[in-house]
Image (cartoon, rainbow, N blue to C red):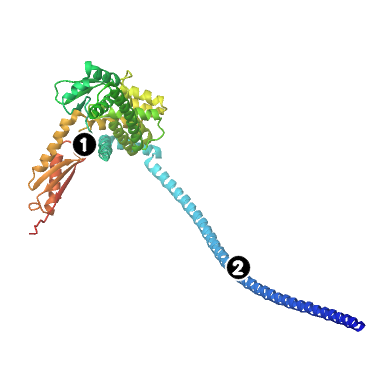
Amino acid sequence: MTNLIIYVAAAAVVGGALGLGIARFLTSARNLKSQAKQKELLLSAKDEALKIKETAKKEEEEKRRYLQEIERNLRRKEANLDLRFDTIERERQNIGYKEKEISKIKSEIELLRQEEQGKLEKVAKLSKEEAKKLLLDSIEKEYKEDVVAKIQKTKKEAQDVVDIEARKILSSAIQRLATEHVAESTISSVNLPSDEMKGRIIGREGRNIQLFEKLTGVDVIIDDTPEAVVLSSFDPVRRHIAKMALDRLIADGRIQPAKIEEAVAKAEKEISQEIKEAGETACYDLSITGLHPDLVRILGRLKFRTSYGQNVLQHSIEVAHLASMLASELGADVSIAKKAGLLHDIGKAVDHEIAGAHHHISRDIAKKYGMSEDVMHAIEAHHDDIEPKSVEAIVVRVADAISGARPGARRESLDNYIKRLTELENIANSFDGVEKSYAIQAGREVRIIVKPEDIDDLSALKLAKDIAKKIETDLQYPGTIKVNVIREVRATEFAK
């Protein structure tokens, strides 16, 4: 038993020693492995550092070469600048020497001139001023009549040139704006589907027509005219509202007080919006900004106002265009001329409500909404009772006259306008070989179609020239007329 215990104890001692040795061996192995790995990482880091160092050296070398090249270039440029500076300095010195020489020569010439002048005065026994006066008196006596005639001729030529240039400016401005005019009636007519509709418009005991006239402020004229009634009012806006409302009532067929009130209210709303849009469109087309909204609305009312059959809003827009073109040609203020041209007749929108001449009312409206003094003066001076004191005022007056006098603009000149267009076409048709002719662009162009079998290309050129000469001889017209001869050949065949 004792031996067994001894054996066990010995085995335990041996096992412990053996385990301790194994543990020490494993620890030593791990340490060796860790040291090897650390050496490997250290070597790798050294290699990487070496590569970075080499790269840095290469970059440093390249930058050094680049800087050396820049330095060499700078030295070359510096040398060139020094050379140029030396050259310029030499040239400056040469110029200084030449200036001194020129000054010396001038002094010598002046001395010689004074000497010669003294010799002449001794010979003539006259001073310089006395000789000058004597010469001028002699010339004045001998050529006085010629000088006067020359001055008069020069003045006449200058006046002719001024007149020609004025005509050119006016005709150029007129031709740049070829506005078409539409004459509108001051009385509106409403078509009816049948005469039976007249009784429905009148209503029982006249209730419908009385309410309609009360709401719209127009007179409804119902007479023997078949399938039509007439709306009459001094206010074009009211007349337009009444026409729109009545058209809707007729289309609906139910004409009764409630429907009349509804139709008139709706028409008033739409016309109000149309007035606003008309004013805004006019300002947009003319590139005029900054006007008060109420002023724009009053301007829009001119859409429903006519003067001698000419729509006042279209007339105002045209005057604004013409005034700006003329102001541009003359070097005047285009903005003032354009605004004054647009607003010159704005008083006509309310002249049935306010007493006074429309151009004075226009000025008051412009003043109320903050227009400048120059614009207000140009507005009120477009009629003869106010003397224009600025170029812009004269320009607006001229533009207003041009727009009103343009052929076809107003009923007073419509017959003459049509007659001139007819005469223009008759002149073109009087030539042989002309098939058709059309006067277009308000008489600014006559387009002529010739017979291709009778007129060749060369003859067409001659024909255009001959027609232009005959128009110049036989007609009176503003500006220029374009003669456009068209020769067209068509080949036609039928496949059977």
Q: Residues within 10 Å of mark 2 (few under 14, many from 20)?
A: few
Q: Residue at x 38, y 43 (%)?
A: 123
Q: Is residue 195 above or below residue 9?
A: above
Res. 99 visible in picture: yes
**Percent position (x, y) of residue 267?**
30, 28
Q: Which residue is mark 1?
A: 478
Q: Is residue 389 visible?
A: no
Q: Secondary structure at mark 2?
A: helix
In the rendered image, the vertical position of residue 12 relative to residue 275, given as above or below: below
Q: Nearer the viewer, residue 123 or 327?
A: 327
Look at the picture and state if 92 lies above or below 468.
below
- The residue pinned by badge 2 equals 67
As shown in the figure, which amino acid type bears the numbered disc 2? Leu
Instruction: Measuring from the top left, give residue 284's x and y in whole percent.
Output: 36, 37
Q: Residues within 10 Å of mark 1 (few under 14, many from 20)?
A: some
Residue 99 placement (x, y as % from top left): 50, 54
| Mark nearer the N terminus (1 vs 2) | 2
Quadrant where the N terminus sits is: bottom right
Q: Position of residue 465 (x, y in %)?
A: 15, 47
